[in-house]
Amino acid sequence: MPSVFSRIIAGELPCYKLAEDDLFIAFLDIQPLAEGHTLVVPKIEVDKMIDLPEKYLSGILPFARPVAHALERAFPDKRCGMSVIGLEVPHAHLHLVPLSTAGDISFTRPKLSFTPQQMLSMQALILQLL
């Protein structure tokens, strides 16, 4: 059965897309730790980041960089933290999380909830800055 990320990539499920190329897609997390929390996902379904083919491992940070810079401009008092956890969805992915402290990227914290309109507003803001 395809992962939820594979279903997003295939267009079967909607997302708040920020960037896409032949190898990767970036979209807002719908269970975020912070405003702008973004997932960068390779377009091949591999469970663990360390098992990705070389071109994906070497390409994920260059793909994520402009998105991370846009997040820092969208949320100016924040840095863009990065994390690879890989427990909730069996599909390799990188979290980009605007943060002020190390605790802001703790996945033990309660997730935030935003309305669809708030998500669209965040998406539009970030897209303007890409």
Image: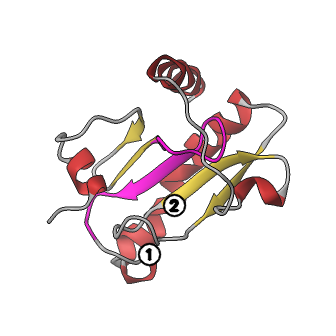
Question: Relative to the observer, which residue lies in front, 111 or 89?
Answer: 111
Magenta stretch, overall SS: loop
Relative image position of residue 73 (x, y in whole percent): 72, 31
Residue drawn at the location 59% of the way across and 43% of the way down = 37
Question: Which mark sits nearer the N-terminus, 1 or 2?
Answer: 1
User: CB atoms at circles 1 and 2 under 8 Å apart?
Assistant: yes
Residue type pointed to by label 1: Met
Question: Relative to the observer, which residue lies in front, 106 or 100?
Answer: 106
Mark 2 nearby-residue class (10 Å; few <14, some 14–19, many ≥20): many
Mark 1 nearby-residue class (10 Å; few <14, some 14–19, many ≥20): some
The C terminus lies in quadrant: top right
Question: Relative to the observer, which residue lies in front, 119 or 48?
Answer: 119
User: Where is residue 36, by image quadrant?
Assistant: top right
Q: Which residue is mark 1?
A: 49
Q: Which residue is mark 2?
A: 94
Residue drawn at the location 47% of the way across and 71% of the way down = 86
Question: Relative to the observer, which residue lies in front, 102 or 52?
Answer: 102
Is disc 1 placed on a helix, strand or loop? helix
In the image, residue 98 lies in the stretch drawn in magenta:
no
The N terminus lies in quadrant: bottom left
Relative image position of residue 112 (x, y in whole percent): 61, 40
Extent of the magenta region:
28-45
**Is 64 situated above or below 88?**
above
Residue type pointed to by label 2: Leu
User: Where is residue 6, by image quadrant?
Assistant: bottom left
